Amino acid sequence: MQKRIWLLTAMILIFTLVFASCSQREAGEEQPQDIPTITDEETGETDELIRETVVYYQDDAGYLVPVMRKIPWVEGIAKATLHVMMDTPEQQEDLMMMGLKPLLPADAEILGMSIKDGVAKLDLNGAVLDCEDAAAESNMVQGIVMTLAGFSTIDKVQFLFDGKIVDTMQHGTKVKDPIGPSDINIEMSDDTAAQGAKVTVFFQSTSPSQYDYLIPVTRITSSENSTLETAIRELLKGPKDVDNMTIDIPPDTELVGIQMEDGITYLNFSKEFKDLANSEESEAMVLKAIKMAAAQFPEVEQVEILVEGKDYAGKVPFDSTPVFANEY
């Protein structure tokens, strides 16, 4: 009899664990075993309760800016991540240091959130409908979508406001249907020939608090295909909005060619590129912008930089380790 009771108890326990696991997967929450381990370089201690998450803010010029934040692990971390996008007292110090602005107002509330089949249903209170203008409204929606899409269980976001789905927001942003990530900071081309492929390039900006960051820009090109060569050539052209962005690539630098060998992609620049090493700060941002441009192409696994066919010898070490555009 005791053996039967023990066997029955074990079966109930197994069923409970399986049911809980399935329920958690259906809810779409990230699993603890998926959390990257963060190691403190000074102490050597590890912290498994942190998730590196890319969160979107906006700068004074109205551009969306991705920033990698270390979010403490809690149950429902996707929902918790949205709280670092709010203009709350807890976030004001960090936002002030970064010189960026939150996308959600201080009185925003998350009334509910569920995830199923790749769609996150996000119910916000009516306070978020009171945006300053159409640009702020669009940025808020797009920033939320791109932040949540950083979680493997979320592909699109269905917005609700006070429990209801609306067709459009106050300034015309359409939110009736689930929304997926879209082109970020897209440039409106004044070149009639530029009706081809889109690439994402990264340009530098500096906040009033002297926080240097990279802004991703979706550029429409005249090329038929979206390739690394196209992206690098567009990066060399520099930003169109020179009042709010820059990239300190030495003048007259040209892309001589791109070659792939043994899984390594070699970017060969003209001799002018060597002058980049004269400024470590500029060098670091330019090299990161190149790495970020390359990262959008899955076929590019590793990048090396050449100048006139020889290894680039700068002051800042260059490697192909994955990077975030901005970290804080």
Image (tube, rainbow, N blue to C red):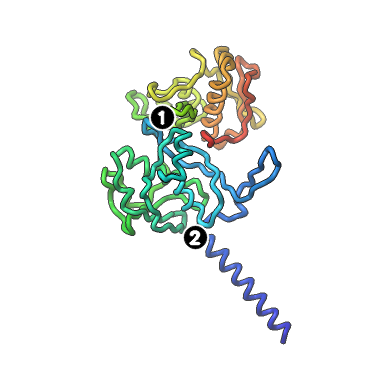
> Measured along the vertical axis of the image, is residue 122 above or below residue 171?
below
Q: Residue furthest bottom?
A: 1
Q: Secondary structure at mark 1?
A: strand
User: Callout 2: 10 Å neighbours few (<14), some, many (20+)?
Assistant: some
Tell me the residue at 47%/24% (across/down): 235
Name which quarter of the figure residue 120 lies in.
bottom left
Q: What numbered label is drawn on residue 219?
A: 1
Q: Is residue 65 left or right of residue 189?
A: right
User: Looking at numbered disc 1 in the image, what kind of residue is underneath it?
Assistant: Arg
Around disc 1, counting alpha carbons within 10 Å, would you say few (fewer than 14), some (14 to 19), or many (20 or more)?
A: many
- The percent position of residue 280, horizontal first and vertical second, equals 58, 20
Residue 184 is at least partly visible in this image: no
Above or below, 81 relative to 185 = below
- Residue at (34%, 27%) from the top-left corner? 189
Q: Is residue 3 left or right of residue 142?
A: right
Quadrant that contains the N terminus: bottom right
| Tag 2 residue | 27
The answer to whether residue 149 is left or right of residue 305 is left
Q: Nearer the viewer, residue 199 or 240?
A: 240
Does dot 2 land on a helix, a strand or a loop? Answer: helix
Out of 164 and 281, give the one closest to the viewer.
Answer: 281
Q: Nearer the viewer, mark 1 or mark 2?
A: 2
Residue displayed at 42% across by 50% down: 156
User: Horizontal and vertical percent for residue 218?
Assistant: 42, 32
Q: Position of residue 38 (x, y in %)?
A: 63, 44
